[in-house]
Amino acid sequence: MSKRPFERSVRQLRFRETRHLLLTTLPGAFWIVLFLVLPSLYLVSMAFLTNGTYGQPSLPLTFDAFRQLAGFGFLGWSPGNLYTLLRSLWQTVVATALVVVIAYPIAYYITLCRQSLRPIMLLLVVVPSWTNQVIRAFGWMNLLAPDTPLSNLAQSLGLIAPHMGLFPSSFAVTLGLIYNFLPFMVLPLYAAFEKLDTTLVEAARDLYASPLKAFWVAVFPQTLPGLLAGIVLVAVPAFGMYVVPELLGGGRSLMIGNLVASQFAGGSNWPYGAAASLLMLVATLLGIFLLRRLGRRAGGGEEVVI
Amino acid sequence: MKRGITETLANESTARKASSITLEGVEKSFSREAIALDGVDLTIKAGEFFTLLGPSGCGKTTLLRILAGLDTPNAGVVSIGGVDVTAVPPHKRSVNTVFQSYALFPHLSVEDNIGFGLKMQGVDKAERTRRVREMAEFIKLSPLLSRRIHQLSGGQRQRIALARALVCEPDVLLLDEPLSALDAGLRGQLQVELQRIQRRLGMTFVFVTHDQQEAMVMSDRIAVLNDGKIQQLDTPRAVFERPANAFVARFMGHSNLLEIKRRGADRLDTAIGPLTLPADAEHMNDGDLVLIRPETIELGDDALGQPNRFDATVVESFYRGSHFEYRLQVEDVALTAFSSNQGQKLFAADDRVPISISPSDLMTVRGEGG
């Protein structure tokens, strides 16, 4: 007997499987190509164009935009952009770290509340973010302006010079970032805390771990996936933040997002702006890569999904 | 300094440190309606395999958690080895628990899981490694030491949970339904193994289960719990053969309990008819029930010419290999009977069968209310 009919039916089955796979993934793939891949390619090619006389991107292809980004201008090298990049990274790290410190107890506290109270508590965390960012930034401007109670308090403690406000300053920017991104940390942490296996904590306590050690060995590793997800959700948009530094920094604590915005809007140097956003993209990807490595080590080799 | 497990085993004549446990008037409630323990007095002897047996919600797990220090009683005193530990937190008690879900740390290797308790106690690394290796050898886990928890089967996890608790050499080992997640074959094997380990180490084991077979196989003594109260505390044989009340009788697997309508000197009127009791029948109380154990009912020709003879109708019959199980009906009363398989005929539904119950197999037990 020949094997032919059997082989043919297997091939037919495979074909059907492939067709099914293509048909189901095609709409998603189309969406990604149209709104992610093509614009990204456009952005990349933009970065290699030259800025035309009237501010329009034009040929030939050069590295001018990157040279400019690295700080080489008409007047020789200036560290301005390097400072902007470092300031962005620093603001992001500080703001994210503080968000973690604030959000961790909040998320834990909400899981301790009565079941019926929890949705309300979560709502209270989320509701502020329903207001427009600009309006919230203006709110902080009023609170932190010179001769307001908070500024006067800081002044009497000797934290700021007389008749200066807490705003505008990099302090105000950090505060604005924390305020903006707190919900993005609380929610994934809450999800992690909610499904926390408390018997692991009891096992640690039973095996002679003090409350603090039990936290490190039984609670912290379990919240790690939520924590890492929160860090990505906070750090990535905070790094590219435009509104908060623009308004609360008073034009002095610019972040890389402001650099990009000014090249596309005000300065009208699109290749320069595109190069800056590519730098942002690379920095972000690098950050996520490092975070994954860190998560894998802390999770004991187990994949911590972000 | 503590001795290692193998030294203890090599030197079985020297009695290991084992602790007795005393509970006095222990009460625990989680809300006004949910009373978990309702005044429990209990003494567990040093080196004993003690089982807390009862249906879910009877308070047995709460009692175990109170011994571990994971729950605090609302009232009463808990002493371990003669020392009042009622207010001592779990990490300061020489008591370790094998959890029902095993509760192994997923981010640690098998070796680090087993060594966790020793590490927390401040045992140095060399000593810790030695004792973990020794324990792994003892419990046949050595090849798994470098594995991760998620790579292991249920039975292997169970052994690791046991090793993790045993390696600390606690005064008391608590086991919270540790075998309930395993399949029947493995469960039977581990029952025997657990019992052997307990005998060899001479450690006090407190075992929680809802499975009366498991309790009878393993324990030195059993406390049957219901509604937060101890119903009976005795050896497995006594609990099975002389249940203190109707609850214990039912829970231990005796399903035939008959109400007494009227009692005479040596006869009782019941729903299935008059029953002759043994001459030395114990003193009876109002509300007592007659207990007929399923395996004491004689069926067919064996029943002819015996006292306490009735005519029964077979409602259902089951072939169970070593024995036959019958659901019988006598005068509107349902009875369960087991007859051991000696190659005799298996009666079918609707068969009319004579049955008899020997007076010496009959006993009375206190009703649920009493």
Image (tube, coloured by chain):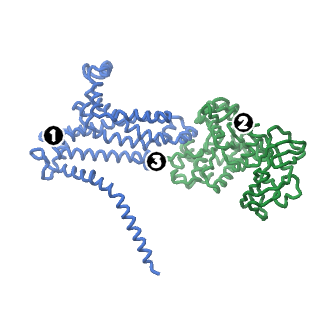
Chain colours: A blue, B green
Q: Height in image: A11 above or below A77?
A: below
For badge 1, the amino acid type reads: Gly
Q: Chain of mark 2?
A: B
Label 2 secondary element = strand
Labels 1, 3: front one: 1
Q: Are marks 3 and 2 in contact (CB under 8 Å)?
A: no
Quadrant where the image shows the C terminus of chain B: top right
- Crowd rating for badge 1 (residues with CA inside 10 Å; few <14, some 14–19, many 20+): some
Q: Relative to A247, is B120 on the left or the right? A: right
- Crowd rating for badge 3 (residues with CA inside 10 Å; few <14, some 14–19, many 20+): some
Residue placed at 53% from the left, 42% from the top? A200
Q: Position of residue B22 (x, y in %)?
A: 70, 34
Residue placed at 12% from the left, 53% from the top? A60
The residue carrying mark 1 is A267
Q: Position of residue B121 (x, y in %)?
A: 57, 38
The residue carrying mark 3 is A300
The residue carrying mark 2 is B42
Residue at the far bottom: name it.
Answer: A1
Q: Height in image: A2 above or below B39?
A: below
Labels 3, 2: front one: 2
Quadrant where the image shows the N terminus of chain B: top right
Q: Chain of mark 1?
A: A
For badge 3, the amino acid type reads: Gly
Residue at the far top: name it.
Answer: A156
The residue lying toward the viewer, choosing from B316 and B36, is B316
